[in-house]
Amino acid sequence: LARALESLAEEGVTQLFKPQIGSQWIVGVVGMLQLDVLKSRLVAEYGLDADLEMAPYDAARWLSGTDAELEKFAAANRGGMAADRDGAPVFLAKSAWEMGYVAEKFPNVKFLKTRERHEVHAES
Protein backbone atom coordinates (compact mmCIF):
# COMPACT_ATOMS: atom_id res chain seq x y z
CA LEU A 1 0.00 0.00 0.00
CA ALA A 2 2.81 2.42 0.89
CA ARG A 3 4.46 1.98 -2.52
CA ALA A 4 1.15 2.46 -4.32
CA LEU A 5 0.39 5.64 -2.39
CA GLU A 6 3.91 6.94 -3.03
CA SER A 7 3.58 6.26 -6.75
CA LEU A 8 0.22 8.04 -6.96
CA ALA A 9 1.61 10.97 -4.96
CA GLU A 10 4.51 11.27 -7.42
CA GLU A 11 1.93 11.54 -10.23
CA GLY A 12 0.20 14.35 -8.37
CA VAL A 13 -3.01 12.42 -7.71
CA THR A 14 -2.61 12.96 -3.95
CA GLN A 15 -0.24 14.33 -1.33
CA LEU A 16 1.28 12.16 1.40
CA PHE A 17 2.02 13.40 4.89
CA LYS A 18 3.81 11.63 7.75
CA PRO A 19 2.68 13.07 11.10
CA GLN A 20 5.32 13.78 13.76
CA ILE A 21 3.12 11.91 16.21
CA GLY A 22 1.77 8.54 15.09
CA SER A 23 2.73 5.95 12.53
CA GLN A 24 0.01 6.21 9.87
CA TRP A 25 0.48 8.16 6.65
CA ILE A 26 -2.14 10.80 5.88
CA VAL A 27 -3.33 11.07 2.28
CA GLY A 28 -4.20 14.60 1.24
CA VAL A 29 -6.81 15.22 -1.45
CA VAL A 30 -8.57 18.33 -2.72
CA GLY A 31 -12.07 16.82 -2.61
CA MET A 32 -14.07 13.63 -2.24
CA LEU A 33 -13.93 12.96 -5.98
CA GLN A 34 -10.14 12.81 -5.79
CA LEU A 35 -10.46 10.30 -2.94
CA ASP A 36 -12.80 8.14 -5.06
CA VAL A 37 -10.27 8.26 -7.92
CA LEU A 38 -7.52 7.19 -5.51
CA LYS A 39 -9.53 4.23 -4.22
CA SER A 40 -10.47 3.15 -7.77
CA ARG A 41 -6.86 3.29 -8.94
CA LEU A 42 -5.65 1.34 -5.90
CA VAL A 43 -8.04 -1.46 -6.86
CA ALA A 44 -7.52 -1.33 -10.64
CA GLU A 45 -3.75 -0.83 -10.77
CA TYR A 46 -2.49 -2.41 -7.55
CA GLY A 47 -5.21 -4.91 -6.59
CA LEU A 48 -5.60 -3.17 -3.22
CA ASP A 49 -9.00 -2.63 -1.64
CA ALA A 50 -8.01 -0.13 1.04
CA ASP A 51 -10.32 1.25 3.70
CA LEU A 52 -9.48 4.90 4.26
CA GLU A 53 -10.53 6.83 7.35
CA MET A 54 -11.18 10.55 7.40
CA ALA A 55 -8.49 12.54 9.22
CA PRO A 56 -9.53 15.51 11.38
CA TYR A 57 -7.66 18.04 9.23
CA ASP A 58 -9.12 20.76 7.04
CA ALA A 59 -5.96 22.09 5.39
CA ALA A 60 -2.26 21.39 4.91
CA ARG A 61 0.24 24.24 4.69
CA TRP A 62 3.91 23.97 3.87
CA LEU A 63 6.06 26.05 6.20
CA SER A 64 8.74 28.55 5.38
CA GLY A 65 10.91 30.57 7.75
CA THR A 66 14.20 30.57 9.58
CA ASP A 67 15.30 27.34 11.23
CA ALA A 68 14.81 28.93 14.66
CA GLU A 69 11.27 30.11 13.84
CA LEU A 70 10.30 26.74 12.37
CA GLU A 71 11.67 24.89 15.41
CA LYS A 72 9.75 27.21 17.73
CA PHE A 73 6.56 26.72 15.70
CA ALA A 74 6.97 22.93 15.57
CA ALA A 75 7.55 22.71 19.32
CA ALA A 76 4.34 24.65 20.00
CA ASN A 77 2.27 22.67 17.46
CA ARG A 78 3.55 19.09 17.61
CA GLY A 79 0.09 17.57 17.16
CA GLY A 80 -0.35 19.29 13.80
CA MET A 81 3.14 18.83 12.43
CA ALA A 82 3.94 16.46 9.59
CA ALA A 83 6.42 16.04 6.78
CA ASP A 84 5.57 15.61 3.11
CA ARG A 85 7.05 12.74 1.10
CA ASP A 86 10.21 14.81 0.54
CA GLY A 87 10.61 15.58 4.25
CA ALA A 88 9.49 19.22 4.01
CA PRO A 89 7.66 20.54 7.10
CA VAL A 90 3.88 20.77 6.85
CA PHE A 91 1.28 22.06 9.31
CA LEU A 92 -2.05 20.21 9.30
CA ALA A 93 -4.79 22.56 10.50
CA LYS A 94 -8.09 21.26 11.84
CA SER A 95 -10.00 24.40 10.85
CA ALA A 96 -9.71 27.79 9.19
CA TRP A 97 -9.88 29.33 12.67
CA GLU A 98 -6.85 27.30 13.82
CA MET A 99 -4.95 28.30 10.68
CA GLY A 100 -5.63 31.98 11.36
CA TYR A 101 -4.73 31.61 15.03
CA VAL A 102 -1.32 30.02 14.43
CA ALA A 103 -0.56 32.46 11.60
CA GLU A 104 -1.25 35.34 14.00
CA LYS A 105 0.85 33.80 16.79
CA PHE A 106 3.77 33.10 14.45
CA PRO A 107 3.98 36.06 12.04
CA ASN A 108 7.52 35.14 10.92
CA VAL A 109 6.40 31.75 9.61
CA LYS A 110 4.93 31.62 6.11
CA PHE A 111 2.10 29.16 5.48
CA LEU A 112 2.14 28.10 1.82
CA LYS A 113 -0.75 26.38 0.04
CA THR A 114 1.60 24.69 -2.41
CA ARG A 115 5.21 23.63 -2.41
CA GLU A 116 7.27 24.38 -5.47
CA ARG A 117 9.95 21.90 -6.41
CA HIS A 118 12.90 23.60 -8.03
CA GLU A 119 15.65 21.84 -9.89
CA VAL A 120 19.13 23.05 -9.13
CA HIS A 121 21.35 23.51 -12.16
CA ALA A 122 25.10 23.95 -11.86
CA GLU A 123 26.49 26.86 -13.81
CA SER A 124 29.57 26.24 -15.95
Image: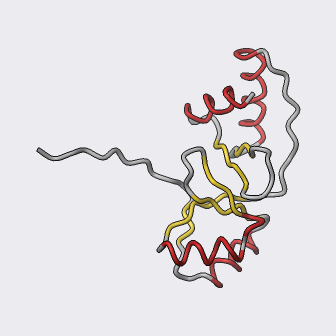
Question: Can you say whether 39 is above or below 98 in the image?
Answer: above
Identify the residue shown where x is 57% and y is 68%: 111
> What colour scheme has been applied to the protein in the rendered image?
secondary structure
Q: Nearer the viewer, residue 36 or 6?
A: 6
Question: Can you say whether 48 is above or below 62 in the image?
Answer: above
Q: Nearer the viewer, residue 24 or 35?
A: 24
Q: Looking at the rendering, which quadrant does residue 100 occupy?
A: bottom right
Task: Describe residue 42's horizontal placement relative to residue 52 as left or right.
Answer: left
Q: Looking at the rendering, which quadrant does residue 24 occupy?
A: top right
Percent from the top left, x then y, of residue 40?
Answer: 77, 23
Identify the residue shown where x is 66% and y is 43%: 16
Q: Looking at the rendering, which quadrant does residue 45 occupy?
A: top right
On-image quarter of the C terminus = top left
Question: Can you say whether 5 is above or below 105 in the image?
Answer: above
Identify the residue shown where x is 75% and y is 23%: 42
Percent from the top left, x then y, of residue 61?
Answer: 62, 61
On-image quarter of the N terminus = top right
Percent from the top left, x then y, of residue 27?
Answer: 73, 43
Task: Describe residue 62's horizontal placement relative to residue 60 as left or right.
Answer: left
Percent from the top left, x then y, of residue 98?
Answer: 75, 73
Farthest-out residue, left? 124
Identify the residue shown where x is 59% and y is 59%: 89
Question: Can you say whether 70 is above or below 5 in the image?
Answer: below
